[in-house]
Image (cartoon, coloured by chain):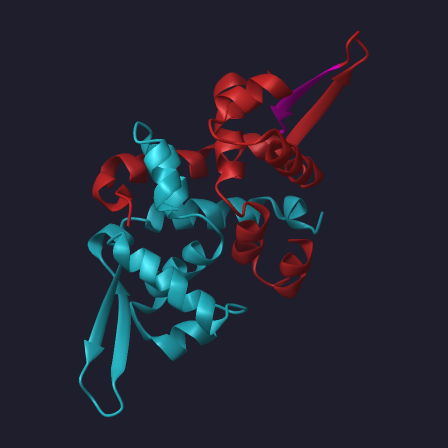
Chain colours: A red, B cyan
Amino acid sequence: MATRAKEFPQCAFRQTLDVLEGKWKFAIIDSLLQHEVLRFKELERDVAGITARMLVKELKLLEAHGIVRRQPYATVPPTVEYSLTDCGHSLQPVIEAIRTWGEQNKAALQPA
Amino acid sequence: MATRAKEFPQCAFRQTLDVLEGKWKFAIIDSLLQHEVLRFKELERDVAGITARMLVKELKLLEAHGIVRRQPYATVPPTVEYSLTDCGHSLQPVIEAIRTWGEQNKAALQPA
């Protein structure tokens, strides 16, 4: 992903597509927009269908891009909470546009 | 993709993410929004970095979901033009939301 983003340094639109590539990141961001703060297990339950391994991978990428904040607590057992940064919160209009389109174009959503 | 969409029949948002999965579909739709009608080779040039094989695959999926229209002409050699359907055109707010976010959050776009 980083490599691809480097290939198009001139185009913020294409770089954004690289950063948000795949369907899981939008689903994770949507879940955090709705719940504000979630532990890993809560996020895993809320993003139906995602595997723990994929969630770890996607959260690391989102954290690296400053979209998700990871807050570990020194409890026993250790707990980690995830939330959106301001940058992550600013994706709300994108999520809303996708949701609106989906609701208005259900015919296009039938399995091809 | 069809299989995954079937797993979440209740949720238009998750189905939309399945249909628009990956970064290429948004890039193809953006190109067709800007140019209205393009031949395959023109589209391949405009969507920088895509391979012919990937473009064929993505166009077939977009056509199957009623987002892209494929118009073949019986010329010699045969030509094919691609354009957006009304449903495809209605994705403009999504594309614009992604573009706006990308321009306002360039820091998040640095390679992780």
Q: Is residue B87 left or right of residue A91?
A: left
Relative to residue A58, is residue A18 depicted above or below?
below
Q: Residue at x 77, y 9 (%)?
A: A77
Q: Residue at x 49, y 27 (%)?
A: A47
Q: Is residue A45 visible?
A: yes
- Using residue A59 as the reference point, say whether residue B89 is left or right of it: left
Q: Position of residue A11 (x, y in %)?
A: 56, 60
Instruction: Residue B32 in the image: state x and y as whole percent.
Output: 34, 64
| Residue B67 seen in this snapshot | no
Q: Quadrant of residue A52?
A: top right
User: Please, is residue B112 above or below residue B53 in the view?
Assistant: above
Query: Along the line of sight, which residue is nearer the eye, B50 or A12?
Result: B50
Picture coordinates of residue A53, whole percent (x, y): 64, 34
> Residue at image x 49%, y 54%?
B23
- Identify the residue at the far front of this view: B3
Q: Is residue B26 left or right of residue B10?
A: right
Q: Give the farthest residue toward the left.
A: B74
The magenta-colored residue range is A79-85
Foreground of the two, B108 or A50 = A50
Residue A82 inside the magenta-drawn segment: yes
Q: Main secondary structure of the magenta part?
A: strand
